[in-house]
């Protein structure tokens, strides 16, 4: 059965789900939700996602929202199909879950307001909060130091294999690398830069970039 994904293909959170589907060879259909027109706040979409965000999915009788929960569900349901995104042992899975939590609570928590101020506010004609950006850059620098240390002794965040721990970061990292002036925070760190170059060369990521028409 084809999974219906409600969202905007260029938005970071839907991309997290779509990348999981591409890695797992799961068929999907994107139902466009125009964020610029605030379609995510309309009553029809609020029935799928009561907080007015994207993505939301429909898979037969199953309806889910929150991209990390969706990705984890499908990585588990189709564990023997496509790329193993969870880890092979209980301990490996715990480490993967740990870094997915780190992405949400430390990486994305700083990257999102950075991108909103540096990329989206100027596009919509709103002023960038320069003082906040400088404060966030200091915080982000410290966060990336943790990643550099982790990747100094591990090929990927979860260990020796590419997993959800890495996948979950990729949409946010794309904004940092391609749409802001902050890519130097990554390229100046040897291990972090090596990691990004490797994961962004994956066929599933390249396919997603083609679908998003960047």
Image (cartoon, rainbow, N blue to C red):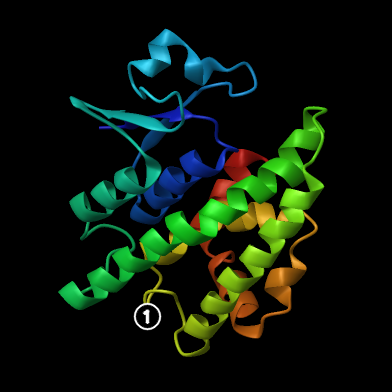
Q: Nearer the viewer, residue 116 or 134?
A: 134
Q: Nearer the viewer, residue 184 or 59?
A: 184
Task: Point out the image quarter for the N terminus.
Answer: top left
Q: Residue at x 73, y 43 (%)?
A: 117
Q: Nearer the viewer, residue 38 or 143?
A: 143
- Left or right of 31 in this view: 200: right
State whether residue 120 is above or below residue 169.
above
- Left or right of 41 in this view: 116: right
State whether residue 54 is above or below residue 92.
above
Res. 143 in view? yes
Residue on which disc 1 sits: 159
- Residue 79, image x, y percentages: 22, 58
Kind of element beneath mark 1: loop
- Left or right of 25 in this view: 80: left
Q: Residue at x 55, y 35 (%)?
A: 9
- Residue 200, image x, y percentages: 58, 64
Q: Residue at x 66, y 70 (%)?
A: 141
- Left or right of 44 in this view: 61: left
State whether residue 81 is above or below residue 209.
below
Q: Residues within 10 Å of mark 1 (few under 14, many from 20)?
A: some
């Amino acid at each position: 059965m084809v999974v219906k994904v409600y969202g905007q293909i260029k938005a970071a959170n839907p991309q997290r789900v779509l990348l999981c589907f591409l890695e797992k060879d799961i068929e999907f259909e994107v139902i466009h939700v125009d964020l610029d027109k605030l379609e995510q706040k309309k009553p029809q979409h609020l029935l799928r996602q009561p907080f007015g965000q994207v993505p939301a999915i429909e898979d037969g009788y199953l309806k889910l929202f929150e991209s990390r929960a969706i990705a984890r569900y499908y990585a588990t349901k189709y564990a023997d199909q496509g790329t193993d995104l969870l880890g092979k042992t209980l301990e490996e899975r715990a480490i993967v879950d740990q870094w997915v939590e780190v992405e949400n609570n430390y990486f994305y928590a700083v990257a999102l307001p950075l991108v909103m101020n540096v990329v989206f506010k100027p596009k919509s004609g709103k002023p960038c909060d320069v003082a906040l950006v400088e404060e966030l850059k200091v915080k982000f620098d410290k966060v990336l130091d943790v990643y550099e240390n982790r990747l100094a002794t591990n090929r990927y965040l979860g260990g020796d294999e590419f997993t959800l721990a890495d996948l979950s970061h990729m949409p946010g990292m794309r904004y940092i690398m391609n749409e802001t002036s902050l890519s130097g925070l990554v390229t100046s760190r040897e291990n972090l830069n090596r990691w990004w170059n490797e994961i962004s060369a994956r066929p599933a990521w390249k396919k997603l970039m083609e679908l998003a028409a960047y």
